[in-house]
Image (spheres, rainbow, N blue to C red):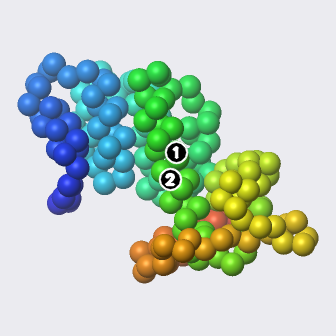
């Protein structure tokens, strides 16, 4: 799989990994996993020395990447919420979570006129209270029944084909999940 990266940091990290031989710390592998996330998680795992594959925090990062790759956002949030990351990784994980949350909120703003609080809970894997706080922070209104949020469209952005594809994937995944829960 040929992938091009424009990030100087990514190129620097990749170079350090490939030129350091046996003198690489687990923290470098963790940092690379976060940077590569979806595109290169297999590369990192396959090049990870066996003694590092048992690192619990690295295994958790791998699961988080998998949840993102599968667009399973409720699992993504649960994997972060239910794990105590080291002080070295906490900041990076918080930044990742904020980025994913912001992108999904912007996608909803550009694609929905209304969305139920239950759907917001399901998409983000959060409680009703937190879902309502998200909406308030974004300046979204509530409908008269208090069951739906009315997202404010971002004046600067317009939904692109990429956004529409992401939305379709998100909705389809949510529907599959609901369908599985009903049948189980």
Of residues 148 and 80, the one nearer the viewer is: 148
| Residue at 48% from the left image edge and 29% from the top image edge | 90
| Residue at 91% from the left image edge and 70% from the top image edge | 145
Residue 102 position within the rendered picture, expressed as x and y whole percent measured from the top left = 54, 56
* 1 and 2 marks in contact (CB < 8 Å): yes
Q: Is residue 169 above or below residue 136?
A: below
| Residue at 60% from the left image edge and 74% from the top image edge | 153
Element type where label 2 sits in the image: helix
- Dot 1 corresponds to which residue? 97
Judged from this view, the residue extending furthest toward the front is: 155
Q: CA distance from mark 1 to mark 2?
A: 5 Å
Q: How many marks?
A: 2
- Dot 2 corresponds to which residue? 100
Q: Which part of the image, by quadrant, shows the C terminus? A: bottom right
Asked whether, in this view, residue 40 is left or right of residue 2, the answer is: right
Answer few, some or many: residues within 10 Å of disc 2's Cα (few below 14, many 20 plus, some between 14 and 19).
some
Residue 69 position within the rendered picture, expressed as x and y whole percent measured from the top left = 43, 56
Q: Residue 147 lies in what quarter of the image?
A: bottom right
| Residue at 47% from the left image edge and 37% from the top image edge | 93
Can residue 120 be seen in the rendering of this structure? no
Judged from this view, the residue extending furthest toward the right is: 145
Q: Residue 11 lies in what quarter of the image?
A: top left
Residue 81 position within the rendered picture, expressed as x and y whole percent measured from the top left = 61, 36
Q: Which mark is residue 6?
A: none
Q: Which part of the image, by quadrant, shows the N terminus? A: bottom left
Asked whether, in this view, residue 12 is left or right of residue 40, the answer is: left
Of residues 133 and 39, the one nearer the viewer is: 133
Element type where label 1 sits in the image: helix
Q: Residue 20 lies in what quarter of the image?
A: top left
Can residue 99 be seen in the rendering of this structure? yes
Residue 107 position within the rendered picture, expressed as x and y whole percent measured from the top left = 54, 68
Of residues 172 and 157, the one nearer the viewer is: 157
């Amino acid at each position: 799989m040929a992938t091009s990266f424009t990030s100087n940091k990514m190129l620097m990290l990749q170079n350090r990994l490939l030129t350091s031989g046996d003198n690489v710390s687990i923290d470098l592998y963790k940092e690379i996993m976060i940077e590569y996330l979806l595109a290169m998680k297999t590369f990192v795992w396959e090049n990870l020395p066996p003694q590092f594959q048992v690192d619990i925090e690295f295994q958790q990062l791998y699961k988080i990447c998998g949840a993102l790759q599968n667009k399973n956002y409720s699992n993504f949030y649960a994997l972060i919420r239910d794990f105590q990351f080291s002080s070295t990784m906490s900041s990076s994980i918080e930044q990742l979570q904020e980025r994913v949350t912001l992108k999904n909120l912007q996608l909803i703003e550009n694609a929905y006129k209304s969305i139920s609080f239950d759907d917001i809970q399901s998409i983000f894997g959060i409680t009703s209270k937190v879902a309502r706080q998200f909406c308030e922070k974004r300046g979204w209104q509530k409908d008269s029944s208090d069951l739906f949020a009315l997202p404010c469209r971002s004046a600067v952005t317009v939904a692109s084909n990429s956004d529409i594809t992401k939305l379709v994937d998100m909705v389809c995944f949510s529907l599959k999940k609901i369908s599985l829960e009903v049948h189980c």
